[in-house]
Image (cartoon, rainbow, N blue to C red):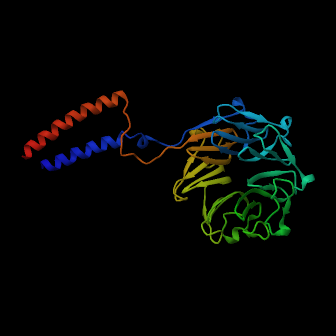
Amino acid sequence: MASFRIALLATAASALSLAATPAALANGLSFTNYTTTNGLGGNNVNGVYASGSTIYAATYGGLSISTNNGTNWTNYTTTNGLGVNAVLGVYASGSSIYAATYGGGLSISTNNGINWTNYTTTNGLVSNNLRGVYASGSSIYAATINGLSISTNNGTNWTNYTTTNGLGGNDVNGVYASGSSIYAATNNGLSISTNNGTSWTNYTTTNGLATSIVRGVYASGNTIYAATNGGLSISTNNGTNWTNYTVGNMYGVYASGSTIYAATNGNGALSISTNNGTSWTNYTTTNGLGSNDVRGVYASGSSIYAATYGGVSIAQQSDPTPSAVPGPLPLFGAASAFGFSRKLRRRLRAAVSTSC
């Protein structure tokens, strides 16, 4: 009987230690929202990207950049050299910034926004109306409403791809590339090229996609994530098979390891899965998002960035796994724990004495 009491008391002590762990007390993400009040060009944010402490927000009022994690913002417009103020997508690499504008072509700065060069149909783009952009090395991929434009020499020359070349649709909503593989999200399927655009394979509902209207795409290794207006479609074998997740009317997707971030309109707003899609947690304005209309999402390190139609919303992720080492207790909690500890030791000594 004494042994049972000792075990029970030891279990209680262990439970006390675990309950004191800060990570075990965490109950989800809390977002901080940034708007025109903080310097954004516009509250309707179409896309977001981040690198280190620098954040890039594509708005209808220009391209807004913060170099101190959102505390302050600098807005770039036609006054600074952008093609137009309506920016629908943004990407950055080093000191180079790529702004996909709707009506003014592709605006590129190679010196952190000080100067801009605009590329339009005059330079070879298939359209001046862009919805997205991605870059890797000297290669630039521009998603337009009339096809996909690709430059392999930093914008000097462009090659255009349309349904004539095998794209599912000419209305391209987003683009991503990795090595020789290019992924184009179109209004008529997800088009994939594994040979730098020479040939394309198009995937639609016939192949297992949730819907054929694809608004965003991301890929990592053999895994492809397609954001459709009917949910998230994931393939783990380069597009051969697809699994669909009903997470709402999607506009964008990003993934890192087993964590997937889904930008949706309404429903869950920002849906996050930490187990490859098995289960999802939804975050809305209740959690601090600027709006439940989320148009883009990105994650870097411990930070999550959501482009909403109410501003840029940022949250810090914490490790949900309880630590074996308890964190410091509040003053009252520490005093209570100390008192309980003394009582526990006395009861343990008494129990041992009785058993002996």
- Left or right of 315 on screen, residue 90: right
At 26% from the left edge and 42% from the top edge, which residue is drawn?
13
109 and 79: which is toward the camera = 109
Picture quadrant of residue 84: top right
Picture quadrant of residue 161: bottom right
- Left or right of 206 on screen, residue 19: left
At 34% from the left edge and 43% from the top edge, which residue is drawn?
18
x, y (%) of residue 318? 50, 43
x, y (%) of residue 167? 79, 66
At 82% from the left edge and 56% from the top edge, which residue is drawn?
153
Residue 82 seen by the camera:
yes
Above or below, comparing residue 335 to residue 181 in the picture: above
111 and 255: which is toward the camera = 111
- Left or right of 257 on screen, residue 109: right
> Which residue extends farthest right?
122
310 and 181: which is toward the camera = 181
At 65% from the left edge and 35% from the top edge, which residue is drawn?
70
Give the number of marks.
0
x, y (%) of residue 336? 29, 30
x, y (%) of residue 189? 74, 64
Residue 230 seen by the camera:
no
